[in-house]
Amino acid sequence: MHLLVIEDDPLLSRSLSQAMSRHGYTVDAFSRLDQANGALKQSRFDLVLLDLGLPDGDGLSLLATLRDRHDATPVLILTARDALEDRVRGLDLGADDYLAKPFSITELEARVRALLRRSQQRLDNSLRFGPLVLDTGSTSAWLAGSPLDLPRREFSLLEALMLSTGRIVPRETLEGRLFGFEAVGANALDVYVSRLRKRLAGSGLAIRTLRGLGYRLEETREQRAAGHEEATRK
């Protein structure tokens, strides 16, 4: 998951980025509206954590701009403004949730998970495809019932593919989720795809490359045949 933090307090911004990164999220953080707006135009984010009092304006103006261009990215407002009218205005402009400062990081993490589930139309933190299960809350994975120890970026890559099983995920989408605006080599994504392919070998699942388009997580031909045979017996 690719998160955008917009917060001008350096200590809080760093704390938020570290907390979210520990849960496997890729995080980009900016302290100004102009920087954040530029990032939102260049890349797709799964969630925005938005402070309101920023050096170059009110965060609500960015929220209004997002919604005016029909960008439905979930937005969680983080602010010291606790007046009822401020909360109502933010929610009416299209914010998905509101958390007043000071807040507990644990509560923030839970709200982030809830917003991501809602945006992906999931009932819980689990993703399942064939013998593969991911728990996005605990960043745990299992393959055929056995724990699968995945580093953060491999987990993020697999999560992105599982959220789009049966569909092609563009290369640039995966690069954004894994690296954000970090400068990486041209073949960085290929390295992680190769590692995941080795982990999935023999499982009946494969990551297929569609040149010029992207990648797709799918069942192998043998796995599909076995599933069809089992369904026929039933």
Image (tube, rainbow, N blue to C red):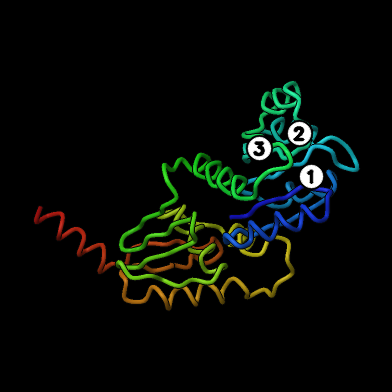
Q: Position of residue 82 (x, y in %)?
A: 75, 30
The answer to whether 21 appears left or right of 162 in the picture is: right
Which numbered disc, 2 or 3, marks the residue that appears first in the sequence? 2
Secondary structure type for disc 3:
loop
Quarter location, residue 100: top right
Q: In the picture shown, does residue 198 fall above or below 208?
A: below
Circles 2 and 3: CB atoms closer than 8 Å: no
Which numbered disc, 2 or 1, marks the residue that appears first in the sequence? 1
What residue does disc 3 label? Answer: 71
In space, the residues marked 2 and 3 are separated at their CA atoms by 9 Å
Q: Quadrant of the N terminus?
A: bottom right
Q: Residues within 10 Å of mark 2 (few under 14, many from 20)?
A: few
In space, the residues marked 2 and 1 are separated at their CA atoms by 9 Å
Q: Position of residue 185 (x, y in %)?
A: 69, 75
Q: In the picture shown, does residue 22 fall above or below 117?
A: below
What residue does disc 2 label? Answer: 65
Which numbered disc, 1 or 3, marks the residue that appears first in the sequence? 1
Secondary structure type for disc 1:
helix
Q: Amino acid at mark 2?
A: Thr
Q: Residues within 10 Å of mark 3 (few under 14, many from 20)?
A: few
Circles 2 and 1: CB atoms closer than 8 Å: yes
Between 171 and 93, the one lying in front of the other is 93
Between 39 and 2, the one lying in front of the other is 2
Between 54 and 195, the one lying in front of the other is 54
The answer to whether 35 appears left or right of 148 in the picture is: right
What residue does disc 1 label? Answer: 37
Q: Amino acid at mark 1?
A: Asn
Circles 1 and 3: CB atoms closer than 8 Å: no
